[in-house]
Amino acid sequence: MGNTIQPNQGIDAARIAAELAARQAEEAARREALKRATEQAAPPKGSGKPQGPQDGFTADATRTPVALDGASGTAPATNLLTENIRDGQRNCLDAAGDYLAMLPPSQQGRAELLLLDDGRAGTAGHALIRQGDSLYDPLSGQRYDSLEAFNASTGSDYRLAATVNGRDALKILSAPPGSPERQAAIDRAKIPDSAAKLLVAQDTSGTPTPTPIPTVTPTETATPPETYTVVADDNVTVIAAKLGVSVQALREANPDVGGLHGVRGEYIHPGDILIVPPPPPPPLDAAPEGSADLTASEGMVDAADTNLATYGEGETEETRYNGRCLEFVAATTSQANGVVDPILSQGNADAALYEAQRQGRLYSDFSQMPAGAIVFWDATGANGDQGHVAIFTGRFAENGDPIMVTTTGFGEDADGNPIVSGVQEMTLSELNGYETVSASGWMMPHGAETETPTATATPTETPTATPTETLTAEG
């Protein structure tokens, strides 16, 4: 789903791993230098004040051994419901969060947190990160070709208990443990209760313990921003889609690169170094009372219904928008409002989601969603890492499930024909199932204040699925 852009080199798992290793080496050297300086000027033992726990995902919190029962001198094993990333007790869930948080937004949605069950009574499991065809152990820093290879190398007998999308995992671990927000994030990720309760904090007693960083007056330079190296055939839309960011954010992060801004006579060239925009803030919980975003758009609903009749399954132009969800929504918005909201001018639905979130126009409270709202899904393997977008009709199924107008083009049979084709009505829950992730939020389309962007260009074809593959969503 979303407009598909053929994959290119750019940021890949190997580059991320190399950058992470370099950062870890630099961090280790910095810690050692700070340790020596502190030891030289340290007061007598017992005279200092104890330091509080580190906040957030940090490799600087002192690691302590883990036990199922939290016996003296150990930290209790934790799970997705109870893990507290701010308690200073580092385990594999903390380490997995560290690694996921260091990935660019476009890579977070492609990575997966694997929850492993040890299978032996009274023994905690473990957490690994899967990227592509390899597994990464966040505690040891080692990569493995498979779970079998990991077990053979470590003498373990772990079995896969659950898989969590990287972005969903970060949202879960960032919410306060035991809070309604934590449970809601677990529910949105569709994690079974048994997996959420699985104790997966491996004993870290054999893992080297980093030296806590003493409290000193900051004199170090800030961490340099992440960068991207331009490759052949890149343009502003392609680069933004690769990075999972919006065109606007990419331009703002690189104000002096004329080739990104359409400056006449200026271009971007292979080898040019660009700054990667930072992740956007989280979606707003709800639109403020009286906001125009809470007003239904009957024009959007009428335009969506018209296009449903024109491009629906069995109609002459049934396949026109298959796999082109963002183009469909942009065209529908143009019909309803006379212009296309600039947010919908991105290269794919995932980038449009990023920009809606960056502008503070994305809301996560679906109970507020008015008719005509545009609903976004994160990039997943099910939608070709392009994200998805659909339109809320304002109507509900008998069970109260919101009904959406959506493009399809889901999977293909042996003859290359879509298994699910045309513009259709589906419930929010049905689309969550196709996308393998719950919707991220909704926004109301606005008119263009300063420009009227054109609808996105026809994308290249999405790789087709064979009849033996799991049904996937592409449009």
Image (cartoon, rainbow, N blue to C red):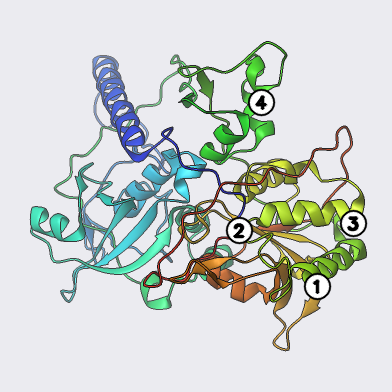
Q: Earlier in the sequence, mark 4 or mark 2?
A: 4
Please give the residue where the numbered disc 2 appears in the rendered image. Answer: 323
What's the CA distance linking mark 4 and mark 1?
Answer: 39 Å
- The quarter holding residue 161 reads bottom left
Residue name at image x 57 percent, y 35 percent: 238
- Percent across and percent down for residue 84 are 42, 55
What's the CA distance linking mark 4 and mark 3?
Answer: 29 Å
Q: Are marks 3 and 2 in contact (CB under 8 Å)?
A: no
Residue 309's disc is 1
Residue 251's disc is 4
Q: Earlier in the sequence, mark 4 or mark 1?
A: 4
| Residue 363 seen from this side | no
What's the CA distance linking mark 4 and mark 2?
Answer: 27 Å
Report helix, strand or loop for mark 4. helix
Question: Viewed as shown, does residue 247 lie left or right of 93?
Answer: right
Query: Comparing marks 3 and 1, which lies closer to the viewer?
Result: 1
Q: Earlier in the sequence, mark 3 or mark 1?
A: 1
- Percent across and percent down for residue 300 are 86, 62
